[in-house]
Image (cartoon, rainbow, N blue to C red):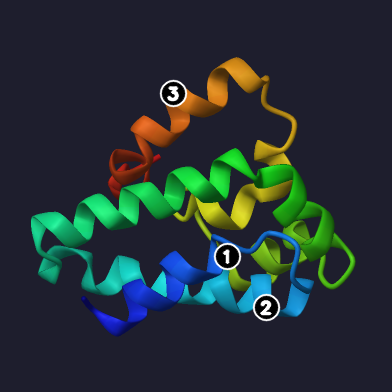
Amino acid sequence: MNSVLKNYCVSVEFPDVSGAEHLEMLQIRDRLVEIESDLSEAEKTLLTKGDRQLIENVNDFYHELSRFVNLADIRKAEAIPPQRWWWYLDVLVFLPISLKPELTSHSESLSKRSF
């Protein structure tokens, strides 16, 4: 398995660690976008599973991240587009629970979509 993907998959299993570690996880997810086309189908499935875990635990991840950083400020400073949805946890946390499973099933297409 790709080492970057492995780090991401491990990171999303621990929503209760520090916001600093979650910030690193978001940066790892950025690196995965860059290499996503090189991932095998099995690795893409693992990426989708990791994304699903991130979204399913969005409240916990956001809570810890918000103690450490302001995601809206980071997005503005770095001009982060909506295609990099993982930087929008502060927005996703307010989605109704019923929409979150739908989002996880479309996470791959969202990361590639042009808004």
Q: Quadrant of the N terminus?
A: bottom left
- Mark 2 or mark 1, which has the lower sequence index? 2
* Label disc, if present, on residue 79 of the rendered structure: 1
Circles 3 and 2: CB distance less than 8 Å? no
Which residue is under mark 3? 102
The residue located at (75%, 62%) in the rendering is: 16
Which residue is under mark 2? 21
Q: Say whether residue 39 is left or right of residue 69.
A: left
Q: Residue flagged by tag 1: what amino acid is it?
A: Ala
Residue 66, position in %: x, y?
Answer: 84, 61
- Mark 3 or mark 2, which has the lower sequence index? 2
User: Is residue 98 at least partly visible in the picture?
Assistant: yes
Cα–Cα span, label 3 and label 2: 27 Å
Find residue 8 and report its image quarter. Answer: bottom left
Q: Nearer the viewer, residue 37 or 5?
A: 5
Residue 67, position in %: x, y?
Answer: 90, 66
Which-is-in-front pick, marks 3 and 1?
Answer: 3
Categorize mark 3 by other alpha carbons within 10 Å: few (<14), some (14-19), many (20+): few
Q: Residue flagged by tag 2: what amino acid is it?
A: Glu
* Label disc, if present, on residue 110 of the rendered structure: none
